Image (cartoon, helix red, strand yellow):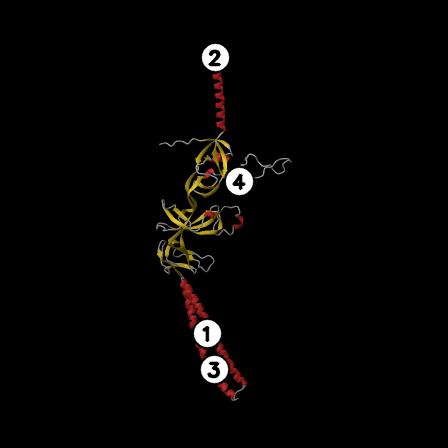
Amino acid sequence: MASKRAKVAIGATAALLLAGVVAVSVTRDMRRRVLVQTQKVARADLVSIVSASGEIKPKRFVNVASDVSGRITRLLVQEGDAVRQRQVLAQIDSTRFEADTRQAAAGIEATRAELARAQADLDVSRLAFERTQRVYADELVSDQVFDQARAELEMKTAGVEALRKRIVQQEAMLESSRDLLLKSTVVSPMDGVVTSLQKEEGETVIGAQSFQPTVIMTVADLSVMEVEILVDETDIRNVALGQEAVVRVDALQDLKIKGEVTEIGSSAIPRGATVAGQQASAGSTANQAKDFRVTVTLEAPPASLRPGLNATADITTARKADVLAVPIQAVVVREVDKQGDVVDPDSAPVEEGAPAGSSPRARGEEREGVFVVAKRQADFKPVKTGVIGETDLEVVEGLAEGQEIVTGSYKTLRTLKDQAKIKVEEKKKEAR
């Protein structure tokens, strides 16, 4: 009886020891496993969007400047006024141009009077030459008298022609003076609205004939508005003419305006550079981030929209329905050798100059992929991706619907190795 009890006690003790060993082994194994978050591959509708900020501008506007220099004597419009084409906007001091016009006109009149007198003298010289010519034919006058009469006629004829040409020259000068006088009145080049008034009555302006004329005001057609944005160089390849866009204006909360991409710049703009300094700094921007200018024309802009307002445009560059999709962060990059096996990042290649007999590892190819959950381990699976949505991206090749993949955490995915033992983190139940 005692022997039987001893055997039972020994068996129980052995069972407890075995259970303890198993428990310790399982606990140690679980501690070695990487804690991950997972999700099943499912279908979704994806929309790829490129967002960029910019400024509201009228599609058609003109910076109005005077053609002549001078002081503004009258300013006939205010900022916000609607104007018509050829409407008078301002008047530049025209005293000098009026005087030049009167002087040119008076000079023409004086020359015309001189021409009339010269024409009369020419007529007299012609009659005298004709009489001399007749008597010379009868050999009643000498050669000298005849030659003198002919020379005088030619001289008077040349004088009349010179005066006629002078009149043509003076008439051109008169037209120039009248043109300058006319240009001293500044008129609107188009129908529109005065969106900016930069000068006041009494100020002096520099005319358009100079290198840098003074802008008096800006007249814009507010019926067609656009937003000019700067798109990052990494996104510009996805932007195309005709793509839809939604524009949000900072000053007009909760207002979304539909638009369409109508212009795409062909030259890169160094980030932070002004338009004037683009070419000057072109040689020193090799490693600088660059943007491309893109114009989005707005559909039915509201009356409250004003030029100069800050805005953000969301351009829809691609749209796909019912495609296999995974979270963006689930797609990682790993180095794969020629056999398609993932290279352990800890096995660094042998450096140049290594001792003879060493086995250098060839540099593999970097591939995009996801970690598929199989038998409580994470297996790296190369994939081919497509459209990138806001949080998910399309998987074109490499996965099937319903497969479980590792989706987090982001810190874990950065260092997760192929065929690593994993433990799936339990999802927290949402509070009802």
For residue 238, side relative to residue 361 (left or right) = left
Q: Position of residue 318 (x, y in %)?
A: 43, 46
Q: Residue at x 52, y 82 (%)?
A: 148
- Number of other residues with Cα within 10 Å of mark 3, as a class: few under 14, some 14 to 19, many 20 or more: some
- Number of other residues with Cα within 10 Å of mark 2, as a class: few under 14, some 14 to 19, many 20 or more: few
- Number of other residues with Cα within 10 Å of mark 1, as a class: few under 14, some 14 to 19, many 20 or more: some
Q: Residue at x 48, y 74 (%)?
A: 162
Q: Count of labels shown?
A: 4
Q: Position of residue 374 (x, y in %)?
A: 48, 33
Picture quarter with the C terminus: top left
The mark closer to the camera, 4 or 2, is 2
The numbered mark, 1 or 3, whose residue comes first in the sequence reads: 3
Kindly identify the amino acid type of the residue bearing the numbered disc 2. Answer: Lys
The numbered mark, 1 or 4, whose residue comes first in the sequence reads: 1
Foreground residue, 207 or 196? 196
The numbered mark, 4 or 2, whose residue comes first in the sequence reads: 2
Residue 198 visible in rendering: no
Q: Position of residue 140 (x, y in %)?
A: 52, 89
Kindly identify the amino acid type of the residue bearing the numbered disc 3. Answer: Arg
Kindly identify the amino acid type of the residue bearing the numbered disc 4. Answer: Glu
Kindly identify the amino acid type of the residue bearing the numbered disc 1. Answer: Arg
| Residue position for label 3 | 126
Q: Which mark is residue 164?
A: 1
| Residue position for label 4 | 366
Which picture quadrant has residue 142?
A: bottom right
Foreground residue, 394 or 125? 394
Distance of label 1 from label 4 (alpha carbons):
87 Å
The mark closer to the camera, 1 or 4, is 4
Distance of label 4 from label 3 (alpha carbons):
103 Å
The numbered mark, 3 or 2, whose residue comes first in the sequence reads: 2
